Image (cartoon, rainbow, N blue to C red):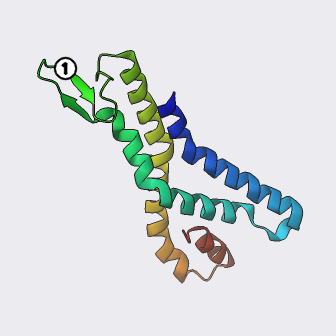
Amino acid sequence: TKYFLRQLIAPVAVAMAAGMIAAKRARWGPRVDVLVESVNTAGAMLKIVFMSVVLSCLLPFVCYGHPGGELSMVSSPATICFSSTIHVGMMAIGVVSFALVVAPFAAVVTYATFEYRLLARSPSPKAGRRLSMWRF
């Protein structure tokens, strides 16, 4: 339960920021580019918390051995690794969080890194808009 809520912090923060940007658009009109501001804000927020999110996703997989042969989680010694339902659930949450938060962010950053050079040289007026999305 605590672990699940911890994994929701980054996605909920990004969703709240997108909601605030949409409200800003409703107040200030079409001069607010929701897509550009949302991508840039989400990127900046995830860049700040990236390592914490990755480490949190991997916590269930870091175990240590007992003299009797069992394994316990380093972050929660009372949780027996790979045999308790709590640990299996935590591993599932960690994998899903990694797949939905960490992997997409890493993919977008990789894509933006390769795309940035092409956009910087492009004479297209759309290139400036796309460049401003990748400022984070």
User: Residue reaching furthest front?
Assistant: 78
User: Where does the image place residue 32, in percent across and percent down from the top left?
Assistant: 79, 68
- Residue 86 visible in the picture: yes
> As displayed, is residue 95 above or below residue 83?
below
Q: Quadrant of the C terminus?
A: bottom right
The amino acid pointed to by label 1 is Glu
Q: Is residue 47 left or right of residue 77?
A: right
Q: Is residue 9 left or right of residue 21?
A: left
The residue positioned 75% from the left and 66% from the top of the image is 33
Residue that numbered label 1 is attached to: 70
* Quarter assignment of residue 45: bottom right
Q: Which of 78 and 132 lies nearest the eye of the viewer?
A: 78
User: Where does the image place residue 29, in percent across and percent down from the top left?
Assistant: 87, 66
User: Where does the image place residue 19, in percent across and percent down from the top left?
Assistant: 74, 52
- Residue 108 visible in the picture: no
> As displayed, is residue 114 above or below residue 65?
below
Number of numbered discs: 1
The residue positioned 47% from the left and 76% from the top of the image is 117
The residue positioned 68% from the left and 78% from the top of the image is 125
Q: Is residue 117 left or right of residue 22?
A: left
* Quarter assignment of residue 24: bottom right
Q: Which of 81 and 2 lies nearest the eye of the viewer?
A: 2
The residue positioned 62% from the left and 62% from the top of the image is 41
User: Where does the image place residue 26, in percent across and percent down from the top left?
Assistant: 87, 59
- Classify mark 1: helix, strand or loop: loop
> As displayed, is residue 56 above or below residue 120?
above
Q: Residues within 10 Å of mark 1 (few under 14, many from 20)?
A: few
